[in-house]
Amino acid sequence: MEQHLEKKIGWEQWLGYGGLGILLLFMFLPTSYYLMVAFPWIFLWQGGFFLLGITLLVMLRQFDRHFLPLGYGLDLAVGAVAIACVLSAIFAPFKGVAFLNLATIFGYGVVLYVLRNWLGQGPWTWQHLWRSLVVIGFAMSTSSLLEWPLLDPISDRTRFPLGHHNFVAAYLCLLLPIVFSFALAQTGKTRFLLLLLTALLPVNIYTCSSRGGLVGLFLWAIA
């Protein structure tokens, strides 16, 4: 039993936990979008991707354990996006910037496949992942609304914590169906309380004054 647990939670998985924790911490830093290109903060998120990259390489070399794809045709979609991004970077007029953005995109892909292969191991179940995304949604919406009154009168658009109002609105639009469906999956007073908390997200999207965010909110309303 001890050998099984030791094999299940190895050093590479702890590295992955550290990398994921770094990325989550960076996401909630004020104006993290601008810190992505600021020294020395740039090393923080790059370090998180680097640790998760090591974890993914170790996973690929564990031949006694199947490496799980995303499934449902999503791997083909990821491959198509990767090919399109590579071609765009090759033919881009500013290749240096393009390949830096390409490296960031591949970092997101690494996170996606690491999380997929963690599912089913120990506490990494889809229910816990679902619950974690709900907590992140509430945390981001609350922190963003708390920062909103502190903005200067000239700029009344909610831009915290990501640093840009369009990004905050887009992120909350993606989280809204996840949080709403989680609330509906509950029963009794818990469902009622979570539905009230879910209302924070569309309110926050409205305070972002993002046209794209409002369009996304409208599409979810008619879906």
Image: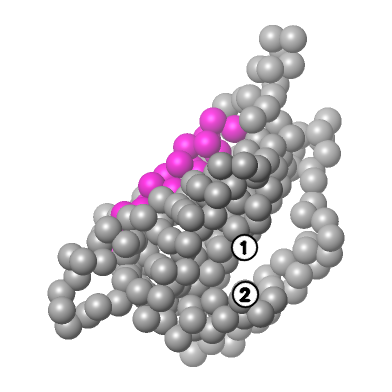
Q: What stretch is highlighted in magenta?
A: 13-31
Which residue occupies 83% across, 39% down? 66
Indicate the quadrant where residue 3 lies: top right
The kind of secondary structure element at disc 1 is: helix
Q: In this view, does 4 lie above or below 206?
A: above
Q: In this view, does 215 lie above or below 53?
A: below
- Residue 77, x across and y down, in percent: 76, 70
Pointer 2 with pointer 1, Cβ within 8 A: yes
The kind of secondary structure element at disc 2 is: helix
Q: Mark 1 points at which residue?
A: 177
Indicate the quadrant where residue 195 lies: bottom right
Q: Which of marks 2 and 1 is nearer the N terminus?
A: 1
- Residue 8, x across and y down, in percent: 69, 24
Q: Residue 220 carries which label?
A: 2
Q: Nearer the viewer, residue 129 or 45?
A: 129
Which residue occupies 74% across, 74% down? 80
* Residue 9 seen in render: yes
Q: Residue 219 carries which label?
A: none
Q: How crowded is mark 1: few (under 14 residues within 10 Å), some or many (20 or more)?
A: some
Q: Does residue 163 belong to the magenta stretch?
A: no
